Image (spheres, rainbow, N blue to C red):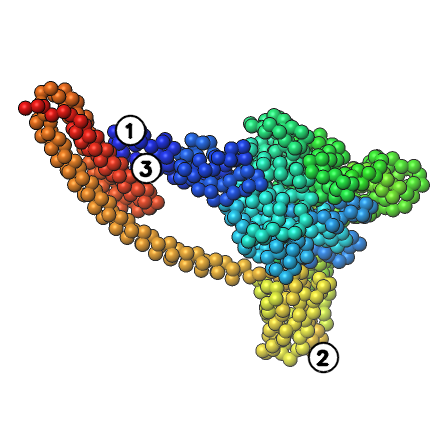
Amino acid sequence: MYPKPRYVAPVVVLAVVLVLLPQPTWLALASPVGEYLVSYAEDPGLLPYLRSYGCTVARDFPSFGIALVECPEAVAKAYRLTLNFEVAVAVGELRTLGPVESFAQPGYSYTTSWSWAVSRVGADLVWGYLGRSGEGLVVAVLDTGVDPTHPLLDGKLLTADPTDPRYPGGWIEFDRKGRPVCTTPRDTHGHGTWVSSILVGGDTSSYLFGVVPQAKLMVAAVLQGGYGTAAQVLAGLEWVTAPYDCLRRRLEVPRPAVVSMSFGALGNYSNVFLPAIRKLIELGIVPVAAIGNGGPYVTSNPGNIWGVIGVGATDVNDRVAPFSSYEEVIWPAPPGSWPFKGTYPGSYSKPDIVAPGVEVAGAYPGGLLAIGSGTSAAAPVVAGIAALVSGELSRRGLGGPQLVEAVYDILTSTARKLEDAGSGYGRVSGYLAVAKAMELEVRSLQVSVSPSTARPGDSVRVVLGAYPGQRVEVFLSGVRVFSGEYPAGGVVVKVPDTHIDGNTVAALADGGGAFGEALLYVKPVLRVDRNATSGTLLSLQVSGLGFGDTVAVYLADSLLLLGSTNLRGSLSARLVVPYVARQTYLELRVRDLSIPGLVLTTGITVAPPPAEPAAVGVVRQLSVAVERYYVVSRVGTVSVTMPEEGLSVRVSQVHPEERVVSVVKVELVGNVALVYLNITAYPPGGYTYIEVSACSEAYCVSSVAPLHVVLEDTAERALEEVSKLYKALQSVEEAARGALAGVVSLSASVAEVASTARKALDEVLELLKRVEGVESLLGSTRLELFSTISRANYTLAVELESLRGRVSSLESGVAELRATYGRLEEVPKLRSDVGIALTLAAAALAISATSLGLTLLRVPRRRS
């Protein structure tokens, strides 16, 4: 192991330098440079003072009184500067699904392209009964970027110039130092597109994903790849308060009502973001942030700041997620004044409120959908409701801190109280919050469901605190299951196909003047034909599973299907029944691979195919060979072996109902037909079924075959990645060779420096000998003085000899460095260390010689 570099200046030289230079300046000569944040609002002279010690200003945020400076580490420690710390997205892994269009499945009277979070907070009821869906509002998101071409976000990104592809005013990107860069909208991770769609995605009828789908969106990319710096966040917040383009030209676009931040620095309680949050509150912009995914007894900055609405996450059962952070925050250095509630308390509870944040669906770049969990999902849900409330209060003339406080008070006072620790004031209720902002009186309506647990297709009784004949409407996870006069004894409704566990039962009376909600817990159900015939299609439906879960269907030991549920937890399929020689009872198993241990089983009776009339000794059957998988928008082949030549071949699609397979051509070679197929679209579940028939004038034979469809050829992509990796390895190998050559060259350079150092030491010793000669010429009256000078110079000589030994040690280190070239990064620092040591030694010698010369001049000569 190569020893870590150390400064090798002698003690005497260090003492001289310490005397001649101020301490921070001397420390700056030997310190690495880092990025730090400086608050100079109360001390405008601080920046010039730091510049005098070698610091440079990389980015200034004058509206916040904060600057990003590049300073030597020792100077930063001396003045307690804050490191430009890192923030990260507050979400686990995003699970990508298929194209968004594939989840708008036909056959349902309600949309299946839907997020449970929308119905849980009552956003769909706000649209339908209160007439508020975000029209005229602007909302801001600070995140990893956005894909504005996604079907759920198309046309939603704000712009001051529709002809400019950079969307000025609606899009901006910042580098790690908070400097704007000119780019067109993009998502560097996928997280930004996802959270943006949870805020504004889709519409109010077919694609229910965003809380305020009619609002306009502003996005600042401050977390490239999912990670960013405090300076990038400050830049994004500065842009939100006064939008400008990438060339820093001010733009005439409206400020947003809220800014949603699905990220944070876990366990951070610094005041870096306080000036920016202060500015937002003073301007009446509501700050909303994820509280973090670190569990109890810790929170994330900026969500843990007083005045920011810190949001925790809940699941479908209205339970606080285990990962959702919460604690009693004890703020280390509260500011003396604060615009929110008039003061900044020393301690307070976080989060302020909770919202759906487990298995929440949203957009993913490329037209796909994704499902993820984290307080990242909960923050835009609350931000959407806060925007609606802010819009109503703004129309009444509220602004500035009074507006932000009023939004906070309405959200927290109307939230549904939860028993779990870490739930704050409760789970946000969009319907009650917006109604209160609109000054509408909404009475509480008692709701109970019996039984409280059921399966899709079962009937349950919903009992309301209403009188018979009163007009009521009942919704189950956004699906209207009853509308009419309330009967005595309650409303009996049928449970639609919906997801597992807690489902929202919401009821309204008197046109929305009364509101209440409860939960119905749903269990899975499997529906399938109990009798089937080999070679036919078996209809299967499973409901009450998770959102977009991967499901495997087995008949006995044969895997018939590997597919995915829709966003309401249901899967419908038609499966080819395998061949049996005689009537057989087989077990059908459905395993939800996304929920460990969830298996549904039933038995079916399979009969052999009916016998076909045929000539004695003639077996007429069709053999169909398919490829391992087929790629959308690419031609694939199916090989068909027929019982004889000369038959006509016909291919038709039997599942799904939507046309996804087209026949390009059929080639006949003897009794083999090669069918070329083009897969035009991705089928639900990734499987389509075709029927191949071969006919003569006397008979026809047919066979049904499944085709596995994928969106892209993963094998090709893997080969491309392997090729890239091989090229990268070649580049690394070449770079290593070059680096090794550099080490050899550097070793020779260091040897030359060591030789020069030896010569310098020899000259110093020669100088000392001359000084001793001068000493002998002085009279006895100054003997004691010269003796003192001699001892001082002797000490200096000893120190310089020590320097000679340290140079020799450096030569040994260089030899070891050549043997261990993997530590290449320490060589430049080592060379710098030698240079600094020699420079300091030379400076010390010069000072000593000068001091000695001056002393000799002052000594009076003995008179003759």
* Residue 635 seen anywhere in this rendered image of the structure: yes
- In this view, the mark in front (3 or 2): 3
Q: CA distance from mark 2 to mark 1?
A: 110 Å
Q: Quadrant of residue 325?
A: top right
Q: Residue at x 13, y 21 (%)?
A: 782
Q: Which residue is mark 1?
A: 15
Q: Residue at x 19, y 33 (%)?
A: 849
Q: As shown in the figure, which amino acid type bears the numbered disc 3? A: Lys
Which label number is shown at residue 4? 3
Q: As shown in the figure, which amino acid type bears the numbered disc 1? A: Ala
- In this view, the mark in front (3 or 1): 1
Q: Earlier in the sequence, mark 2 or mark 1?
A: 1
**What percent of the width, then of the height, locates residue 651?**
68, 71
Q: Which residue is mark 2?
A: 697
**Residue 722 shown left or right of residue 120 in the figure:** left
**What percent of the width, then of the height, locates residue 329?**
60, 28
Q: As shown in the figure, which amino acid type bears the numbered disc 2? A: Glu
Cβ–Cβ below 8 Å for labels 3 and 1?
Answer: no
Q: Quadrant of residue 538?
A: bottom right
* Residue 421 seen anywhere in this rendered image of the structure: no
